[in-house]
Amino acid sequence: MAQHWSSNSAAPAFAHGIFYGLIRGGGRWAAYALLVLVATWYTLCTGHGQRGKFYLARRFPGRGAAARLWHRWRLNFTFGLVLVDRAAAGILGDRGIVGAVREVARLNDLLARQRGVLILSAHVGGWQIAMAALEHVRAEKFVVYRRPAGDVDKLAHEHADGATTLNFIDPTGPDGGALGMLAALQRNAVVCVTGDRPFDGRNTVSVPFLGGVIRVPAAVYRIAAATGAPLAVMFFPRRGPGRFAPLTLEVFTVADRGRELANYRPEAARFAAALEKFCADYCYQFFNFYDLWEK
C-alpha cells in the first residue's frame, strides 16, 4: 500500500514571509538567491529533503550516492522555483504565461460542442497558477481544489487583492466533487482536476507508471463518459524564470462503459502514459513527494 503525503507546506509561516518580503523588495531573483541555500538545507539537513527519493529512484535508477544527492537537490530547488514564481505572480502581477494562444484556441473549439471541457492535469510544473494561462478561454472556469487545513502557503491571487475569476469545487465531500463537476460541465464550463493523486484512496484504478503500478482517481473518466465532455490532458511546465507554458499531450472523449470504474482503466492508463512522457522531458518538475507505487 503506497504511503500518503500531506500537501501542507513543510516550512513555517515566517519562512514564507521572508520569501514574500524578498520578492516585494528585490524581485524574484532575490528570492531565487535565498532559495539556493534553502534547497541545500532541506536536501542535506532535514527529512523533508528526502521525500522525492521515491520518484527519483524510478526516474534515475541505478545512480550512485553523489548522483542521487544531486537529483534530490535539483528537484527541491525546482519545486522552490515554482513556489517563488507563484508568489511573484500575485505580488508582482507578472503571471508569465507564454505560448498559450494555440491551447486557448483548441479549448474554445472544444467548448463549441456545448459539452464543457475537462482539463486533466497533475502536480507537475506550475499547476497551481495554470488557469491563468486560460484567461482568454470563453467560459467559466472551475478548479477541483481544497486547501489543506493549516496550510500557510498562499495561492497567487491571495498575494494581490484576493479576487479571482476561478470557482472552486471541494473534492472532499461524500461525492468527491462529482456533483459540482457535473453542474459546471452542464453550463459548458472548463473544469480542471488533477488526475495523479487520489484524495481519499477511493474510486481509483491501478495503472503502470515509471516501471511500477500506481493508483489514480478514476471518477473523472466516468464523468467525462456521462456528460460527453472531452478530456484534455494538459500540463504547465516551467520554461524559465517566471515563465510557464500550457502543454496539451492528449485530447480524447470517453465512451460510456457503465458505472464500474475499472472499465475506465484504459483512459487512466492513457493519462499516466502522458504523465510519464512529461517526466521524461521535465524530470525535475514532478512534485508528488511520497511513495505512489504499490508494493
Image (cartoon, helix red, strand yellow):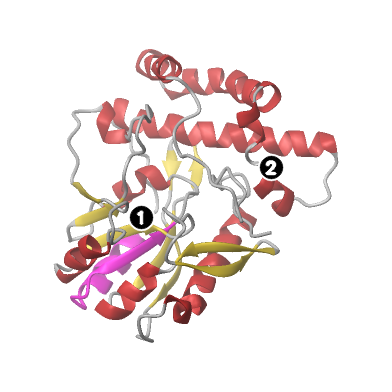
- Left or right? Give the position of 170 relative to 292: left
- Name the one closer to the observer, 160 or 45: 45
Local packing at callout 1 (Cα closer than 10 Å; few below 14, some 14-19, many 20+) is: some
Q: Which residue is mark 2?
A: 53
- Left or right? Give the position of 61 relative to 166: right
Is label 2 in a helix, a strand or a loop? Answer: helix
Residue 16, position as x, y percentages in the image: 42, 20
Relative vertical location of residue 46 with respect to residue 227 in this rendering, above or below: above
Is label 1 in a helix, a strand or a loop? Answer: loop
Residue positioned 65% across, 24% down in the render: 46
Q: Which mark is residue 271?
A: none
Q: Say which quadrant the C terminus sits in.
A: bottom right
Distance from the alpha carbon under mark 1 to that under mark 2: 33 Å
Q: Is residue 122 magenta?
A: no
Q: Which residue is mark 1?
A: 100
Residue 172: in sight, yes or no?
yes
Dot placed on the residue nearer the N-terminal end, 1 or 2: 2
Residue positioned 52% across, 42% down in the render: 5
Residue positioned 17% across, 66% down in the render: 183
Residue 144, position as x, y percentages in the image: 30, 53
Give the amino acid type for the residue marked by disc 1 in the picture.
Answer: Ala
Q: Quadrant of residue 223?
A: bottom left
Farthest residue toward the left?
Answer: 187
Give the amino acid type for the residue marked by disc 2 in the picture.
Answer: Lys
Q: Which region shows up in magenta?
A: 101-121
Residue 249, position as x, y percentages in the image: 48, 66
Relative vertical location of residue 106 with respect to residue 124 in this rendering, above or below: below
Local packing at callout 2 (Cα closer than 10 Å; few below 14, some 14-19, many 20+) is: some
